Amino acid sequence: MSTVIVKKDDLTTASVDKKYPLGAVYVDYTSSDAIKPAYIYVKAGAALTKYRPYQVSISNSLNGEVTTKAPATYAFGAQIGFPQADVTNGYYIWLQIAGKATVATTDTVAAGDYVEVLNAGTGLKLDGGGSGSTVESVQSLGIATTGTDSGNATVILSGNKVKIAGS
């Protein structure tokens, strides 16, 4: 794997021009967090809303081979990323896949709850659907460090590839 040098501003700024290899992963080793922030470079397959979850996918279009789509039911191995800025359809952006991140939620989430994304999900939900979701599963994207009532929360993303349940 080759090293990618990234301008920090590019992590939160979409571009009409491809600046990095699609599918490249950047890890911020300067972070003092135990789970280092990691990002994957993609081309937006539709307009993306900051902090919402998107599934990383592949495409046969030139300069768009690594793209995004709404989360879809997936038995295992789905890569989920979160844009830290709004993105215009067809623009290039780094999606955060690991480390401490701001993410959208659609449930009431408390610090210490594990979170997942469901089919067509526009935000993270409690893993397993119950309050006090303190058990990690194959669907867990991360664990909340702050609480919210269906808004934005701070979550430590594991970077694991996950199962996306239908409901």
Image (cartoon, helix red, strand yellow):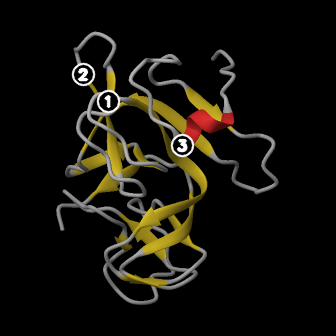
Q: How many marks?
A: 3
> Quadrant of residue 93 in the image?
top left
Q: Looking at the image, which residue is at 66% across and 27% down?
A: 6
Q: Secondary structure at mark 1?
A: strand
Q: Which quadrant holds the N terminus?
A: top right
Q: Which residue is mark 3?
A: 12
- Residue in front for this viewpoint, 23 or 128: 23
Q: Secondary structure at mark 2?
A: loop
158 relative to 30, above or below: below
Mark 1 touching mark 2, by CB under 8 A? Answer: yes
34 relative to 80, above or below: below
Q: Amino acid at mark 2?
A: Ser
Q: Secondary structure at mark 3?
A: helix
**Residue 87: x and y, percent?**
36, 41
* Discs 3/2, front: 3
Mark 2, other Cα within 10 Å: few <14 / some 14–19 / many ≥20: few
Q: Is residue 53 left or right of residue 47?
A: right
Q: Amino acid at mark 1?
A: Thr
48 relative to 68, above or below: below
Lower position in the chain sequence, tag 3 or tag 1? 3
State the mark number for residue 59: 2
Mark 3 touching mark 2, by CB under 8 A? Answer: no
* Discs 3/1, front: 3
Spatial CA span between label 1 and label 2: 7 Å
Lower position in the chain sequence, tag 1 or tag 2? 2
State the mark number for residue 67: 1
Q: Amino acid at mark 3?
A: Thr
